Amino acid sequence: MKKIICCFILLLSSLIIPSPFYAQQSGQKVSVRLDARFDGEVTDKESGFVGRYLKMIVNGEINEKFSYSFRHRLYVDHENPRSFFNATDWANVTYKANDWFSVTAGKQMICIGTIEYDYAPIDVYFASDFWNHVSPFQVGVNAGFKSGANSQFYVQVTNSPFSTEEMQNLYAYNLIWYGRPAGWYSTIWSANMIEYEEGHFINYLALGNKFNFGKTSVDLDYMNRYAGKGTAFFEDFSLHGKIHYNVSECVSIFAKGGYDVNNSQEAQAQFVYDRYVLPGVELGFYGAGVEYFPIKGDRQTLRLHAFWCSNTSNPVPQTFNIGLRWQMALLNR
């Protein structure tokens, strides 16, 4: 761990201290920042303060054609090179051929629809059962196609998130659409084929919808999961929504709820198709909260939050949480 910290300091120093080589690359741009969140939480059984997230994010442009992106979780204990790479959410390079076509290769987020899935984890206070269990980052390649000013499609192939070891011949095939059919309505829709065993897939249809009306925004998500057995729709699915209202420039309130169910197999099934919402699960969740941004006109650098949430499990849990999130800009040039 000490070696990794030393390497990180040396890397950061090399970015901050100009070099003759960098001076020759005058077209390059780079930004480096840390993003952190700390919470104080009280549940029915325990309470305390916890460091929830600490991440380093690096974005840069090599030239007008090539760019790169990197996000790494610094709070993970890195015992070996493989675990170190597992703590890297993404590390990839993008080639922009022109205004309508690009290719990205490297570790990246699997292209699955819904608004909830698209949020950065640091901005999610409580979530669906699917979100709580999904493994969203894998190595792969995607091609992006821009079909208009407000419509972008990505075709992606990655390792399957169900892989238990490297080079296992399991893949995920994904098609996603980021659209804005109207100024007040945007979409994140996807169709996914994810291999859980060689030649056998579970299929997702994930429909994320966001509605904006002045100070109010509404997220409405539906995800259907089907492995070729039983009824195609409404046996294994998630439905959730969120309403967010900006009370003022510095204060927002929100409420969120959802429902996850998997009746596609018996709860005691020996071989499970859906590894994220397990057979027999039928769980609702709900909660509400408030966000305060103490720096007027800046909702990125510093945020305070408080929320309460619960769900329909037995016994019914109660969670109260207050916390702080801040971003530290280390380099921007």
Image: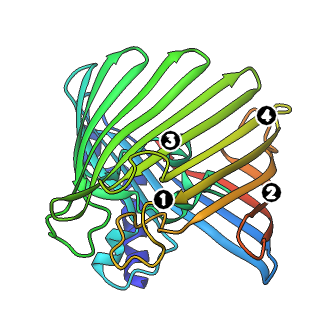
Asked if the residue under mark 3 is in contact with the one under mark 1, i.e. CB atoms within 8 Å, the reply is: no
Q: CA distance from mark 4 to mark 2?
A: 15 Å
- The residue that mark 4 highlights is 245
Rounded to the nearest whole Å, what is the CA distance between mark 1 and mark 3? 25 Å
Which secondary structure lies at badge 3? Answer: loop
Label located before the other in sequence (3 or 4) = 3
Residue 212 is situated, as x and y percent measured from the top left of the image, at 66, 24
Side of 199 where 6 appears, left or right = right
- The percent position of residue 131, horizontal first and vertical second, equals 53, 57
Q: Quadrant of the N terminus?
A: bottom left
| Mark 2–mark 3 distance (CA, rounded to whole Å) | 22 Å
| Callout 2–callout 3 Cβ contact below 8 Å | no
Labels 4, 1: front one: 4
Disc 4 to disc 1, how far (Cα)?
29 Å
Give the numbered dot on residue 307.
2
State the residue position of label 3: 114
Q: Amino acid at mark 4?
A: Tyr
State whether residue 26 appears in this view: no
Please, what is the three-letter code of the amino acid marked with disc 1? Met
Q: Which numbered dot is residue 56?
A: 1
Compared to 233, does 317 lie above or below? below
Q: Secondary structure at mark 4?
A: strand
Which residue occupies 52% across, 73% down? Answer: 75
Lower sequence index among marks 2 and 3: 3
